[in-house]
Amino acid sequence: MPKPGPRTTPRYSATFKATAVRLSQMPGVAVQDVAQSLYIHPFMLSRWRKQAREGLIVTKGATVNKEMLAELKELRRVKKAYDRLRLEHDLLKKAIAFTSERNATSSPSSRGKRTSR
């Protein structure tokens, strides 16, 4: 149940917005990753980027730590590796289910009772 009273939305400082925009403009960094790491919605960051293009947010004074940039790139790399592993895991689960089902429905004579001669 929501809290009674007016809804409050967080206000972000101009330096926070400018830094977020600068981070999202770095090469090799995705807007989604920046938004996720700053705990903001990607649409909000896209809106700030538009405001920066229009001159409403000044990004020239914003500084970006090399550590933050490296962390965002590492996050992107880890997410790609995770998605790949998850896909491989799903494929293996399907293959195991398929072979288990196939073995269960096979005839008893083909299961391997060999007669010695």
Image: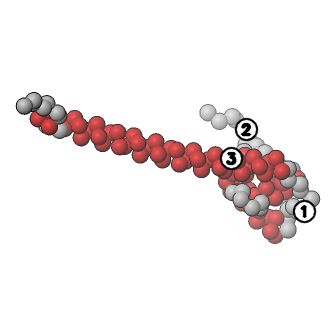
Residue depicted at 76% across the width and 65% down the height: 50
Q: Are the residues tagged 2 and 3 within 8 Å (C-beta)? A: no
Q: Amino acid at mark 1?
A: Lys
Residue 60: numbered disc: 1
Quickly name the residue at label 3.
75
Q: The C terminus is located in which quarter?
A: top left
Left or right, 36 with respect to 67, comes to: left
Q: Are the residues tagged 3 and 1 within 8 Å (C-beta)? A: no
Q: Amino acid at mark 2?
A: Gly
Residue depicted at 77% across the width and 49% down the height: 70
Q: Position of residue 76 (x, y in %)?
A: 66, 50
Q: Earlier in the sequence, mark 2 or mark 3?
A: 2
Crowd around label 1: few <14 · some 14–19 · many ≥20 (10 Å): few
Q: CA distance from mark 3 to mark 1?
A: 26 Å
Q: Residue furthest right?
A: 61
Q: How is the image coloured?
A: secondary structure
Q: Earlier in the sequence, mark 2 or mark 1?
A: 2
Query: From what the image shows, is residue 113 above or below residue 64?
Result: above
Label 3 secondary element:
helix
Left or right, 61 with respect to 105, comes to: right
How many circles with numbers are drawn on the protein?
3
Crowd around label 3: few <14 · some 14–19 · many ≥20 (10 Å): some
Q: Nearer the viewer, mark 3 or mark 1?
A: 3
Quickly name the residue at label 2.
5
Q: Nearer the viewer, mark 2 or mark 3?
A: 3
Q: Position of residue 21 (x, y in %)?
A: 79, 58
Q: Is residue 113 visible?
A: yes
Label 1 secondary element:
loop
Q: CA distance from mark 2 to mark 1?
A: 39 Å
The front one of 30 and 86 is 86
